[in-house]
Image (tube, rainbow, N blue to C red):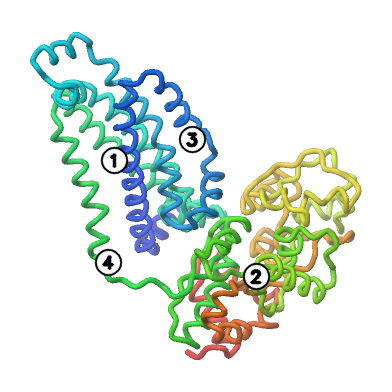
Amino acid sequence: MTYLQDFYQLFLQRQDMLWTALWEHLQLSIISLLIAVFIAVPIGILLSRKDRMAEFIIGIAAVLQTIPSLALLGFMILFVGIGTTPAIIALTAYALLPILRNTYTGIKEVNPAIREAARGMGMSTYRSLIKVELPIALPTVMAGIRTSMVLIVGTATLAALIGAGGLGDLIMTGIQRSNNEYILLGAIPAALLALIFDGILRVTERLTKRNSYKPVIAVIGLALAIIFVPMIAMRGTIGPDLVVGGKMGAEPEIVGNMYKHLIEDGTDLTVQVQGNLGATDFVFNALRVGDIDMYPEFSGTIVGELLALEDFSYDPDEAYEQAREGIFDEYQFRFLEPMLYNNTYALAVTREVAEENNLETISDLERFKDEWTFGFSFEFVDRQDGYAGFADQYGFELADVRSLDAATGIQAVANGEVQVTDVYSTDAQIVEQDLVVLEDDQNLFPPYQGAPLIRQDTLDKHPELEDILNQLENELSEEDIQELNFRVDIEDENPSDVAWDYLVEIGLLTE
C-alpha cells in the first residue's frame, strides 16, 4: 500500500512533467510512423511489380531493424546532431520493415483472376491498383502499420538519451536514481499509449475490410492534427541563445543549471539546459556538431578518454593543463577554470563486505579476483582510465565482470548481486547505501577536476561568458556536490532550484 501511495504522490507532484513527456512521445511516434508509411507503402507497391528487387530491398529493411537502437541513435549525432531529428530518422528506419513487407505481401496475394477481371473491364494498371488491388490488400498493410506503431512507441523511450524528450526522460530519471516510481511513471503511460494506438489501428484494419479508404483517411487526418496544431500554436516562439548539455545523472544537470543561472543573470542571453544526453561520447559529439554550446567535463575524462593520452599526469594542476591544451589543439574547444571538487572514479563495496574481508585498497581485491562478481558501468568498462587499463595498472584481471548501468550497479552491490562496482566519488548513493570507497593505491584514476568545456566559436561570439563561467573557479567542494546530488537524487528536488540555492548561498546570485 505504501508503494502505491508513493507512486500516486509522485504522479500528483510530477503531472506537468508527465503530460509534457507524454505529448512529446505521442508526436515523436506519430511523425515517425507517418514518414515510414509514406516511404514503405509506395516502395512495397513498386516491389510487387519488380520481384527481382523485392528480396534485396526487404533485406535492407531487415538489416536496419537489426541495428541496436542505442548504437544507431549515437551514430546519428555526428550527422544530424541531437534532438528529435535523429530520433525520428532512427524510429522511421525501425518501422519500415513490417509496413514494407506487409504491403508487398498484401498486393502479391491479390487473386490474379481479380486482376484479370479489372483489365477486362478496361481499367489501366494504375486504376486497377487504386480501385481493386490496394483496397483488397489494405487490411494486410494496416496489420504491418500496427506492428510498426507498437515497435516505435517502445523504442522511442530511448530517444531521451539524445535530447528528444518523451516518456524515456522519466524512465531514465528513475534508472539513474534507482527510483521505481519514476520508472513506472514513464513505463505505464508508454505501455498504455502502445495499447491505445494498437486499438485504434486494429479498428481501422477491420473497417478497411470493407474495401474503403475512409477509415485510413480519418486516422491520417487525426495524426496530422496532433502534429501540426501544437506547431501552429507555438509559431513565433524564439529558441534559446545557448544550449548547455550534460551527461546522465543529477550532477551534470545541477552544474549545467549553475551555468544557466550565471549567464542569464549576467547577460541578456537565454539558456536551455539539455541534461541526460547519455555517456561522454554522446555529449561530446553533440558539442562537436554544434547542437550544444558547452557542458561540464572533467580533466581526467579529457586526457584519458577524449584525447587518449598514455602519459597523463596524476598531479591535478598538470592534468588540468594537459586537458586544457590538448582539447584546444585537437578540437579548438576551451576548457575553462576548474571547480574545487575532484569527481574521480572509485571502486566501492558495502561496509559489511569491506569489514568482513578487511578491504581498504583496490589491490586487496586480488584475493577475490576469481571468486567475486564485479559490476561495472558501460562507460567504465571501455575506458583506459577505467577497467580497460585496470590489468596494466594493478597486475591482475577479474574473472567475472558484468556491464551494468551505473545506478543499477550501485543497487546490485547493495542487494548483494555483485560484490564490487564503480562509482563517482560524489555519488549521493555512497552515503545512502553506506558504501566503502576503496583507495586507488596504484593510481589507476587520474584527477577529475570539473570545468566548462565550451566551443571557441561560442566564446568568440560571446566573450563575456568566460569571466561569467569562471566565477565557479575553486567553488563546489566534494561535500557540497554530494549534498546537492542528494537533494536531487534522493529528495527529488528540482536541479534548477538546487543550483540556484547554492549560487545564492555562495554569493554569486541574490534572491
Task: Inspect this view and state whether residue 1 appears.
Answer: no
Q: Residue at x 56, y 80 (%)?
A: 460
Of badges 2 and 1, nearer the viewer stands: 2
Residue 416 at x, y percent in the picture: 70, 45
Kind of residue at badge 2: Gln
Q: Residue at label 4?
A: 234
- Using the numbered discs, state the Cα–Cα distance from disc 4 to disc 3 in whole angstroms: 34 Å
Looking at the image, residue 177 lies above or below residue 267:
above
Q: Amino acid at mark 4?
A: Met
Q: Residue at x 12, y 20 (%)?
A: 123
Distance Cα–Cα, label 1 vs label 4: 26 Å
- The disc, 2 or 4, on the residue closer to the chain's N-terminal end is 4
Residue 327 is labelled as none
The image shows residue 15, relative to residue 205, as above or below, that is below
Q: Residues within 10 Å of mark 4 (few under 14, many from 20)?
A: few
Task: Characterize the local packing of mark 1: few (<14), some (14-19) or many (20 or more) Cα atoms within 10 angstroms.
Answer: few
Rendered position, 317 above or below 400: below
Q: Earlier in the sequence, mark 3 or mark 1?
A: 3
Q: Which residue is mark 3?
A: 64
Q: Secondary structure at mark 1?
A: helix
- Asked if residue 66 shows in the view, the reply is yes
The picture places residue 91, in percent across and down from the top left corner, at: 42, 43
Q: Percent position (x, y) of residue 427? A: 66, 63
Which quarter of the picture shows residue 95? top left
